[in-house]
């Protein structure tokens, strides 16, 4: 996947709990066609948008494929 380091950063930024769609778009949407990190991650099935009653209520969450993309969680001491 192009820009894999940024894709990993996006998935980590979203984290284990959903983020609001609005916050995600403010932080990650770009008009630069070379940096379509959010769109690429959506297309690859690494993240998904969860509809809400309105766009303000919509959320973005990491999918199982996104969690696998990050690799195994580090062991805790």
Image (cartoon, rainbow, N blue to C red):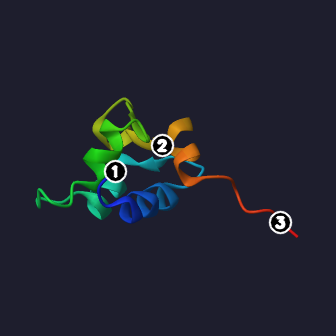
Q: Which residue is mark 2?
A: 61
Q: Nearer the viewer, mark 1 or mark 3?
A: 1
Mark-to-mark CA distance, 3 and 2: 24 Å
Q: Are marks 2 and 1 in contact (CB under 8 Å)?
A: no
Front residue of 29 and 32: 32
The spot of residue 12 in percent (x, y) is 51, 60
Which residue shows up at 33% across the image and 40% down it?
42
Numbered mark located on residue 1 in the image = 1
Mark-to-mark CA distance, 1 and 3: 29 Å
Which residue shows up at 46% across the image and 51% down it?
19
* Residue at the farthest bottom position: 77
Q: Which residue is mark 3?
A: 76
- Kind of element beneath mark 2: strand
Front residue of 36 and 22: 36
Q: Is residue 63 visible?
A: no
Mark nearer the N terminus (2 vs 1): 1
């Amino acid at each position: 996947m192009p820009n894999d380091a940024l894709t990993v950063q996006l998935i980590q930024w979203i984290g284990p709990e959903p983020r609001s769609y609005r916050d995600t778009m403010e932080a990650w949407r770009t008009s630069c066609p070379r940096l379509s990190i959010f769109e690429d991650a959506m297309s690859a099935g690494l993240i998904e948008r969860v509809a809400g009653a309105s766009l303000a209520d919509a959320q973005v969450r990491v999918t199982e494929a996104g969690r696998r993309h990050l690799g195994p969680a580090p062991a805790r001491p």
